[in-house]
């Protein structure tokens, strides 16, 4: 299974962009990169996903390197409510035609006032 | 609110006992996933069902079992409970077995004493 590596923690000033890196050097060509976040012990919340191209939605942007071995999640204007653990996940196909979402240890982002 | 409903929210039980956790997926979702989150293990994938059939298995103990019913709700049964089974158990759902995006419930806190 492809695995992801993230820094354990990061700080970001409120109002600034938060750039969260992720390494997934063993990713296969058909495996998507997903980002979720977990605030306290709530259920993980979907943020964004991508395969090759950069993606943007109302929450964040996802930048994937051309070799697909790493990606960066960008929160353009971080607020205190963005303080959470951010998980970079590779969606791995299973023999039955479904997918498993393999969570790593995540990055604990703290947004500072 | 993701639309995924889990009950009970909190449960305390003794070692050796058996409990059942229940999950109602989002309306229209046919696929259900179960995850376990303990302090030292992060989010671990347990099992996935699609339209009543088991489709993928992760690190699920033999003492644990799950099923998905015709109305698409799912139950996770945990038996012969041990102290180490204390964790937050999440259910997630998606429309298809390919699980393009999965949405998590708020979890069930299980404490084994």
Image: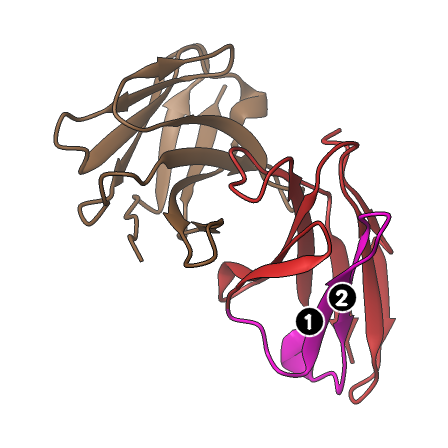
Chain colours: A brown, B red
At a point 60% along the width and 37% down the height, the residue shown is A39
Query: Magenta part of the protein: which range?
Result: B59-85
| Residue B53 image position (x, y, % from top left) | 67, 59
Left or right: where does residue B35 sit relative to residue A106?
right
Q: Chain of mark 2?
A: B
Contact flag, marks 1 and 2 (Cβ < 8 Å) = yes
With respect to residue B45, does B113 lie above or below?
A: below
Q: Residues within 10 Å of mark 2 (few under 14, many from 20)?
A: some
- Please state which of residues A100 and A73 is positioned toward the viewer in this rendering: A100
Q: Chain of mark 1?
A: B
| Residue A27 image position (x, y, % from top left) | 23, 45
Q: Residues within 10 Å of mark 1 (few under 14, many from 20)?
A: many
At a point 81% along the width and 62% down the height, the residue shown is B21
Q: Which mark is residue A51?
A: none
Residue B36 in view, yes or no:
no
Left or right: where does residue B69 sit relative to residue A81?
right
Q: Is residue A18 inside the magenta stretch?
A: no
With respect to residue A85, does A65 lie above or below?
A: above
- Please state which of residues A29 and A107 is positioned toward the viewer in this rendering: A29
Q: Which mark is residue B110?
A: 2
| Residue A92 image position (x, y, % from top left) | 38, 49
| Image quarter hosting the N terminus of chain B | top right
At a point 26% along the width and 30% down the height, the residue shown is A71
| Residue A52 image position (x, y, % from top left) | 25, 25
Q: Splitting the image into 4 quarters, where does residue B35 fall? A: bottom right
Left or right: where does residue B10 sit relative to residue A103?
right
With respect to residue B112, does A92 lie above or below?
A: above
**Circle 1 is placed at which residue position?**
B86
Q: How many marks?
A: 2
């Amino acid at each position: 299974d492809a695995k992801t590596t993230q820094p354990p923690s990061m700080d970001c000033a409120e109002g600034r962009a938060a750039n969260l890196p992720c390494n997934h050097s063993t990713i296969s060509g058909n495996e998507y990169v997903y980002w979720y976040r977990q605030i306290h012990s709530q259920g993980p919340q979907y943020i964004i996903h991508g395969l090759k191209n950069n993606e943007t939605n109302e929450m964040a942007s996802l930048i994937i390197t051309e070799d697909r071995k790493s990606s960066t999640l960008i929160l353009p204007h971080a607020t205190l409510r963005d303080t959470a653990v951010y998980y970079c996940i590779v969606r791995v196909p299973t023999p039955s035609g479904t997918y498993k979402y393999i969570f790593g240890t995540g990055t604990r982002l703290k947004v500072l006032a | 609110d993701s639309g995924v409903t889990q009950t009970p929210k909190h449960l305390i039980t003794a070692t050796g006992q058996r409990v059942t956790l229940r999950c109602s997926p989002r309306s229209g979702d046919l696929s259900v996933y179960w995850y376990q989150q303990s302090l030292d293990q992060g989010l671990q994938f347990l099992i996935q069902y699609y339209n009543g059939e088991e489709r993928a298995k992760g690190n699920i103990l033999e003492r644990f079992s799950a099923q998905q019913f015709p109305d698409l709700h799912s139950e996770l049964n945990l038996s012969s409970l041990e102290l180490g089974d204390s964790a937050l158990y999440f259910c997630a759902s998606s429309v298809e077995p390919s699980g393009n995006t999965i949405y998590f419930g708020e979890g069930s806190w299980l404490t084994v004493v």
